[in-house]
Image: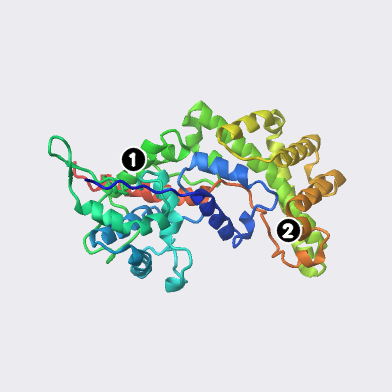
Amino acid sequence: MPSNFGWVDFGEKERQQMLNVVHMFSMPDTRDELGLGSIRDAFADHFFPGTSTIQTRAKYFLFIPWIYKSLEAKGIAAKDVARLARAAEVVLIDKLLASDDTDGIIGKEARANLQRLPSNIYWAGLGAWGVRLLPISQHEYQRSFDHITKAKRTIMLTDDKEPLSSAAELWHPGLPDMPRGFPEHANFSLTADEALYLRDRVTLKHSKSLLAALLLRPDLVESDFPWEHPIVHTLPAQLKSTLKHAQDFSQVMHGAAILYNLMLARQVPHDKGREWEDNYTERLNTWAQNIVKRSSEIRAWSLPDLWNVLDNLEARVHPATKTFIQHWVDLCRSHLDSLERLAQEPAALTLITQRERLLKKARARLNNPRALETWPGSAGAGQLEYRWSTVEVLVKDIVTGISEGAAHVKP
């Protein structure tokens, strides 16, 4: 009689999100200093499901299941899986470093001391793309290895005596075969079959996403932000409208992030503070010029519609965050003829100060010399781009694999 078992995993999504947040603290320009992260992540998850800012290359979506399927095939005991999987991922680092393309190798510097392994970074994405079939955490999967290998050794038959897939199968049955000798000669290049597989996983699981639309486009076009990509003109109306809200939110709220850093720079006593102040003053002026170019669109932007969109995306937006955004947008609209003057506007300065105090309490840097000492000169000053720089690399890997494969097909 076949064994039936399952996993219950509470809080895995939240745990992965927290690990990503911890990573972002090492990237000053992407920190969420003004409490806008829930909106940023809701848009990013909608446009680019299964991605995260710490993913680097598309082939990790294959490397990870290959490593684990190899361990499954060897019948490794559950108590040894975590150790052997880690060892295999460390070996993979060395093999990739020997390849011609070393951009995006996770653990390039840390090697065996790597704290967060690629398997952990990509685990949620493997599930979102449908490469991983069961909704379980990596830890629960490793703990259940004995059950998995036992179930794989038990051939279950249908009433017609046909083999039945094991209930313990974690990986999608269409997963491309692991190359002979893997991880020897491992590299980031995708074969046509591998690239098509990843594209099909995304387009089948998330057919209405911007990521799917990009993967179905035969050519590659670079842009600074997703709304600047020419594919925008071909998107369905609803997706295009959501992207427009994301653009307006990103561009308008960028001014608040710049002003926050400018206010911090003004309080730094030494010459470096004046240098930073000049830098952020220039950045605020550039932001103001860009907003003025879109003044009619900013005036027409409906915040009630934005809240409805975010509700549909199941974003958790605190009422205080909505109030902060509303007040900032109102300030921008009332100063469209002189946005750069927001740097001296008492209402704007008070709004930013109160927002930081609400979020950080005693750790707020403004008007707190000791807390200010922890400011590295930039904190969340970058414009929201919803993982676009990461997604461009993933899309390039997959589309290049497909196009190069097609080029080798003889007519």
Q: Earlier in the sequence, mark 1 or mark 2?
A: 1
Look at label 2 and name its amino acid: Asn
Spatial distance from mark 1 to mark 2, Cα to Cα? 45 Å
Position of 113 relative to 313 (above/below) = below
What residue did someone put label 2 on?
A: 279
Few, some or many residues within 10 Å of mark 1 (<14, 14–19, 20+)? some
Residue denoted by label 1: 200
Name, please, the residue furthest toward the right: 346
Mark 2 residue element: helix
Q: Is residue 275 left or right of residue 206?
A: right
Identified at 23% across, 48% down, the residue is: 408
Quadrant in which residue 320 is drawn:
top right
Residue at the image point whose x is 55% and y is 44% from the top: 225
User: Residue 274, position in %: x, y?
Assistant: 79, 64
User: Compared with residue 152, is residue 316 higher up or lower down, i.e. above or below?
Assistant: above
Q: Nearer the viewer, mark 1 or mark 2?
A: 1
Left or right side of 358 for 77:
left
The answer to whether residue 72 shows anywhere in this view is yes
Whether tag 1 and tag 2 are in contact, CB under 8 A, the answer is no
Q: 16 or 388, which lies in front?
A: 16
